[in-house]
Amino acid sequence: MPALYSYSPVWPFADAFADDLAARAQNKRRMQKRARPQDEPAPFAPLVDIYDLESAYVIQASLPGAAASAINVDYDAKIGTLIITGEIKRTTVADVHGEPASKALKVGERQIGKFERRVKLPDGVKIQQDRMTAKYNNGVLEIALPKAPEPQRRSIVVETEDDVPANAKNATDEQSAAASAPEQAQVRPSNATLEDVPDDSDSASVKSFDSEMSS
């Protein structure tokens, strides 16, 4: 019985060659992705751990190799979002045998360049912004956002005029009447005595007596 198809050793070789080309291309793309250009690093978002404590939110961000002065932490109260930004610069090894090691980089897998990470807090949560803290140690940035205490419910007693004591009401009426009364007392110097104050009636009698004697 004749064979339904003819066998040719060329096709297995072509398949193997195509598979090899595909593997080479995939490996090249993988290496290009891992070895980023030194002058144009890709931006990234650092990984974080978020703790929801009873008194505060604590966020830990992994930033190995970052300088503390190159990290910025902001909190936008309008949208309730924590924003972490900054930049990690690549540190090069020292020159070896007179060769510039800065140009000898072949594979760069470390995350460098500019970074930004936003952490949205639950709606309705209020943060005490004057008590926020940020610490950086061993490549880990730890941010504490203390929660504002929830307002407690309290009752207000409604008072009427009948509830005001009679003595207090009378005292209030007397104070208001005294305040509205016109000034009648005469002001005199503090060093004056009763003898220094002239009597109007005596002055009038003396004037009338002098007039009679002169006539």
Image: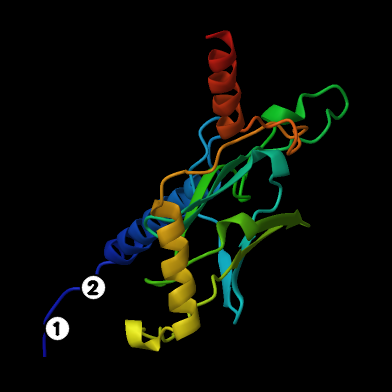
**Quarter-of-image position of residue 67:** top right
Q: Is residue 58 left or right of residue 126?
A: right
Q: Is residue 160 left or right of residue 37?
A: left
SS for callout 1: loop
The residue lying furthest to the top in this view is 214
Mark 2 crowdedness (10 Å alpha carbons): few <14, some 14-19, many ≥20: few
Residue 124 percent location from the top left of the image: 38, 72
Q: Which mark is residue 82?
A: none
| x 71%, y 47%: residue | 65
| x 31%, y 59%: residue | 14
Using the image as rendered, state which of residue 205 and residue 5 is in the foreground: 205
**Quarter-of-image position of residue 88:** top right
SS for callout 2: loop
**Residue 42 is at least partly visible in this image:** yes
Tag 1: residue type?
Ala
Query: Are circles 1 and 2 on residues that touch, CB within 8 Å?
Result: yes
Distance between the Cα atoms at labels 1 and 2? 9 Å
Q: Which residue is mark 1?
A: 3
Tag 2: residue type?
Tyr
Task: Work out whether 141 lies above or below 31.
Answer: below
| x 67%, y 38%: residue | 90
Task: Work out whether 55 lies above or below 129.
Answer: below
Residue 19 percent location from the top left of the image: 37, 61
The residue lying furthest to the bottom in this view is 1
Q: Which residue is mark 2?
A: 7
Q: Is residue 7 left or right of residue 166?
A: left
Using the image as rendered, state which of residue 46 and residue 37 is in the foreground: 46
| x 14%, y 77%: residue | 5
Using the image as rendered, state which of residue 185 and residue 207 is in the foreground: 207
Residue 133 percent location from the top left of the image: 67, 57
**Residue 139 is at least partly visible in this image:** no
